[in-house]
Amino acid sequence: MQFDRNFASAWARLSRANAILYFRQIDTNASRREAVKTALENAQKLEPNSPETLLALGYYQYMVLRDYDAAEITFERVRKMLPSSSEVLAALARVARRQGHFDQSVKYWEQALAFDPRNVELLNDAARTYVMLRQFSTALRFYDRELDITPNDPEVMAAKAGVYLAQGNLQESRKNLSEINEQSPFTAFSVKINQLTYERNYRDAIQLLQDRLAQFPYDSQFWKGVDQAFLALTKRLASDIAGAKVTAEQARNTLEPLYRDQPGNAGLAAWLSQPYAVMGENDLALKLAMRAIELLPPAKDPVTGPGLEENLAVLQTFLGENSGAISTLRRLLQTSYASYLYYAPNPITPALLRLDPIWDPLRGDPAFQKLCEEKQK
């Protein structure tokens, strides 16, 4: 980039890379948003109608503007230029998912894989979409196809374990987590912590989180704060109230400056709400949880938005607002989405309600028990 500023494809790719960081709530600063736009404009000046530039435009519309309809139009335009491109079909699949058209998204993934059947990224994203639909047996088949290409990949094994947890199968889940340790990527690592937590093995879960905080080479304070919040919550579940509050304060001190710099970051608001809840700052915790939903409501993002409501249900459970939590959970059980904080990428299931000690305060309520007994796919 520094040596060849006329390289349109590189500008387009840079725009997309920045858009991903912005969209995933890793960095929602105005400077990141501007970086996406600037790189896109540079590509447009050089090759405005190339497929690479148009893909970058579509991802800008999708990930920054969140104008999914405009992105769909742009990606369809590229599809006419490259009718056999799995990359374009993947883009359409992602947009359809964000529009709440999960069945259409699945069709696009299947079409993309027909052109590129050994593409592990496509297989993984297709599996995740089936997970959001709670079509777990199909999701497992896609993960197995991925493992045929990349045997024993620990992240794929952890994804399978997450599906087994969502089905309530602790034994099969455990078999897939042997390679996950304190150095594993967060999503895989969080499945291991969930496994230990559901088994009520708090000692090992806490030790693993402490080892990670001591040894993991964090490239972002955000992820350090997330692990601190995770540890505080786990200590609370283990009834170490004093230790939980100390760790929650550390998480608050890590995440709060980031949130001050990015007040429009829904993910930061949601993660920050957890340490406040553990610290007993109930009003602030609820305010942040509601702010996260306000920033990214399900109507705006059908994939992530419901997961922020899931976080609110957890906080309501902590605070004894059982009817509100149960009402939210009842709705989420009928919703296709990806959990953002607790079960990512799985949505809530009756099995998870039964297993997760986070819901223990609700177990004496017949309405909650009814949710736990609902039939699962």
Image (spheres, grey):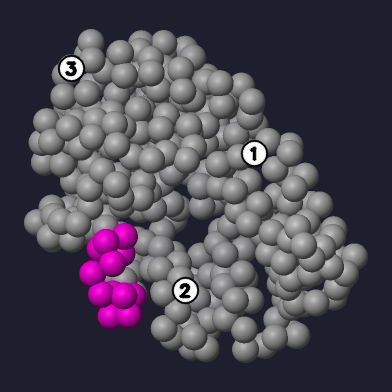
> Is residue 186 in view?
yes
Between 56 and 292, the residue placed more toward the observer is 56
Q: Amino acid at mark 3?
A: Asp
The picture places residue 259, in percent across and down from the top left corner, at 57, 25
Task: Please name the residue that numbered disc 2 is placed on.
Answer: 122
Between 206 and 354, the residue placed more toward the observer is 206
Q: Residue at x 49, y 25 (%)?
A: 255
Task: Please name the residue that numbered disc 1 is placed on.
Answer: 28
Q: Main secondary structure of the magenta part?
A: helix
Residue 121 vertical placement versus 273 (above, below): below
Q: Is residue 152 magenta?
A: yes
What residue range appears in magenta? 145-157
Q: Amino acid at mark 2?
A: Leu
Gap in angstroms between the C-alphas marked 2 and 3: 43 Å
Q: Residue at x 29, y 24 (%)?
A: 232
Q: Residue at x 35, y 13 (%)?
A: 279
Between 198 and 375, the residue placed more toward the observer is 198
Residue 283 vertical placement versus 132 (above, below): above
Q: Residue at x 75, y 85 (%)?
A: 81
N-term mark: 2 or 1: 1
Label for residue 240? 3
The picture places residue 52, in percent across and down from the top left corner, at 73, 73
Residues packed near mark 1 inside 10 Å, few (<14), some (14 to 19) or many (20 plus): many
N-term mark: 1 or 3: 1
Quadrant housing the C terminus: bottom left
Q: Is residue 81 magenta?
A: no
The picture places residue 321, in percent across and down from the top left corner, at 35, 20
Gap in angstroms between the C-alphas marked 1 and 3: 34 Å
Left or right: where 72 falls relative to 287: right
* Dot 2 and dot 3 residues touching (CB under 8 Å): no
